[in-house]
Amino acid sequence: MALSVKDGHALATFRKAAVVTHKILKHSFVRLLEDAFDQAKSITHEEIATHVDECCEHPSKVNIKSPQGHYESCYFPIVQSGGKYDIRPSASTNGETLSDDVIIISLGVRYNFHCANMARTFFVDPVESVRLNYSILLELRRECLAVMLAGRCVGSVAETANRFIRQRCPHLLKFLPKNFGFGLGLDFRESSLIMNAKNQRKFAQNMVFNLAIGFHDLELTDMQKADAQGSIRKLSKYSMLIADTVLIQSGDEPPDIVTKHSVEWKDVSYFINEKNDKDIMPPQGKHYTPEQVFAPVHCFDDILQRSKGL
C-alpha cells in the first residue's frame, strides 16, 4: 500500500505526464486525423501511431518545451478503426489504412518514471444508435468516477458499472469488459490494483489510477445503418473506449481527472459527408424503433431524453 500512495513529487510528475499526453493527443493525433479527413488522404494506423510515438519521445514536435530525454512513450500508441477493435491494454496497432468510421486512440507518456495514460474514441458520420450508446458510456463513466473515493473498495468500480448497465440497459451487459482499469506507478500497470469486482483493496488519497470505460464489439445492424453516410455503412461491429489518469483525493472529494481532453459528443464526432449532426437527431414527433437503436423499449425513451442533454 505504501508504494501505491504517491508523495507530492510523484504526483507532480504524473500531472506533467498527463499534460503532455493530452497535448500530444490534441496537437498530433487529432491534427493528423482531421488532415486525413479534409484532404481525403490515405494513412495507416501504424503511420499515425509512429508519428504520435515520436511526439511522445520529443514533445518539442508539438511545441512543448521540455529538456531532452525527460519524456518517453509508455507503450507504442494504439490506433484502431475499420471494425477490428481490442479495448484491452494489451492491444496493438496494425498496418491497415485508417477508416473514417469509429476510431480509437490510446497513448501514454512517461515523465521521470511515472506514466499518464488516456484513450478516446472518435466517430465519423455516426448513426443514431452509435450516439446513444456513447451517451450511455458517458453516464457509466460518471457513475464509476463517483465511487472512486478514499476508503471505498477498488472493486466497487466494477460492481457499480455492472449494476448500472444491468438496471438501465441490460442488452449492453455482454459488451462490458471485466476490468475497468488499473493503478499507475513506477510500473505502468500495478497488478495488485486491477479494477475488477474481485479486488477488495481500498482507494486511498494520492493513489493514481487509469480508469478505462468501454464497450467491445457492439453490433451494428442493417436497420441501424439504414440512413448511414460514409464508411460506417461497412461496419457490422464497433467498440468504444474512454480512458483517463485519475488521482484519488481525500474524504468524499471526487477524483481529479488529470488528462483533460474532452469526451463530449460535439468534440469527438465528425460529419464529413452530406448529412450533419442535426440529421442524426430524430425529427420532431418521430421516434426510432427499439430495433434501430438496439435498446429495449423500457430504456430507449430514457436514453434518448438524457442523451439530448449532452
Image (spheres, helix red, strand yellow):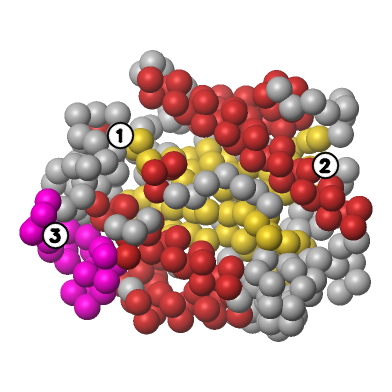
Q: Is residue 80 visible?
A: yes
Residue behind mark 2: 111
Residue behind mark 3: 288
Judge the density around disc 2: few (<14), some (14-19), many (≥20) Cα neighbours within 10 Å.
many
* Precedes in sequence: disc 3 or disc 2: 2
Q: Residue at x 34, y 59 (%)?
A: 309
* Front-most of residues 219 and 111: 111
Q: Is residue 290 magenta?
A: yes
- Could you tell me residue 184's position as x and y percent? 76, 58
- Could you tell me residue 193's position as x and y percent? 73, 70
- Could you tell me residue 257's position as x and y percent? 65, 57
Q: Quadrant of residue 76?
A: top right
Q: Could you tell me which secondary element the residue under label 2 belongs to?
A: strand
Say which amino acid is labelled 1.
Phe
The vertical placement of 92 against 4, above or below, is above
Q: Are marks 3 and 1 in contact (CB under 8 Å)?
A: no
Q: Residue furthest left?
A: 285
Residue behind mark 1: 271
Q: Start and end of the magenta stretch? A: 283-305
The vertical placement of 205 against 44, above or below, is below
Q: Quadrant of the C terminus?
A: bottom left
Give the alpha-carbon distance from disc 3 to disc 1, as whole Å. 20 Å
Is residue 183 toward the left or the right of residue 70 in the image? left
Q: Residue at x 91, y 61 (%)?
A: 7
Q: Residue at x 76, y 43 (%)?
A: 17
Res 12 label: none
- Could you tell me residue 152's position as x and y percent? 69, 82
Q: Residue at x 16, y 53 (%)?
A: 282
Give the alpha-carbon distance from disc 3 to disc 2, as whole Å. 48 Å
